[in-house]
């Protein structure tokens, strides 16, 4: 496991905080993503994009399959005392390939 993934998991074990944007995205009727699904992606998913220079602090995009057998994407940023969940969504085939792990070239 790489160091950044370890930092993410350690932060999530302290506390997980969701931005308003994340909660709005998770609660859209066409996706309804649970906090348990987000936790599954954080713990068992993989980092597919890294954003070390993000204005909100080092963050990343993670992808993982949940208990509902669907792939969920989570953007998160570890902080010293918590993990910030910036957004979570269900990726679409129109934008992603390779098991929803690689953006399609435009």
Image (cartoon, rainbow, N blue to C red):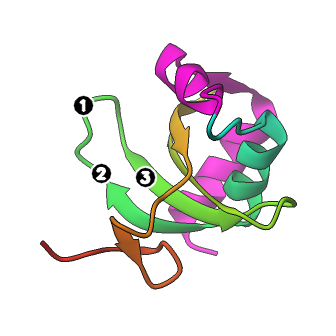
Dot 1: element: loop
**Numbered mark located on residue 55 in the image:** 1
Pinpoint residue 75: horizontal percent, then vertical percent: 48, 45
- Horizontally, is 40 left or right of 97 in the view? right
Residue nearer the viewer, 64 or 6? 64
How packed mark 3 is, by other alpha carbons closer than 10 Å (few <14, some 14-19, many 20 or more), is many
Query: Residues under labels 3 and 2: Cα distance?
Result: 8 Å
Query: Residues under labels 2 and 1: Cα distance?
Result: 9 Å
Magenta span: helix, strand or loop, mainly?
helix
Q: Residue at image x 61%, y 49%?
A: 8
Q: Mark 2 highlights which residue? A: 52
**Quadrant of the image occupied by residue 89:** top right
Q: Residue at image x 64%, y 75%?
A: 1
Residue 79 visible at all? no
Q: Residue at image x 78%, y 35%?
A: 35
Q: Is residue 88 above or below residue 55?
A: below
**Quadrant of the image occupied by residue 32:** top right
How packed mark 1 is, by other alpha carbons closer than 10 Å (few <14, some 14-19, many 20 or more), is few
Q: Is residue 85 magenta?
A: no
First in sequence, mark 3 or 1: give its number: 1
Q: Is residue 38 above or below residue 81?
A: below
Residue nearer the viewer, 105 or 8? 105
Q: Is residue 54 above or below residue 8?
A: above
Q: Residue at image x 53%, y 59%?
A: 62
Q: Is residue 21 magenta?
A: yes
| Residue at the far bottom in the pictured view | 98
First in sequence, mark 3 or 2: give its number: 2
User: Where are the magenta residues, as a range?
Assistant: 1-29
Residue 98 visible at all? yes
**Numbered mark located on residue 3 in the image:** none
**Quadrant of the image occupied by residue 12:** top right
Query: Residues under labels 3 and 1: Cα distance?
Result: 12 Å
């Amino acid at each position: 496991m790489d160091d950044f993934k370890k930092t993410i998991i350690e932060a999530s074990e302290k506390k997980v905080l969701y931005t308003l944007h994340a909660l709005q995205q998770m609660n859209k009727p066409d996706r309804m993503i649970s906090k348990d699904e987000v936790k599954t992606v954080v713990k068992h998913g993989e980092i597919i994009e890294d954003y070390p220079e993000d204005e909100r602090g080092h963050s990343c995009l993670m992808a993982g399959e949940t208990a509902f057998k669907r792939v969920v994407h989570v953007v998160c940023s570890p902080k010293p005392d918590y993990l910030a969940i910036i957004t979570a969504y269900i990726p679409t085939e129109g934008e992603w390939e390779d098991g929803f792990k690689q953006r399609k070239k435009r």
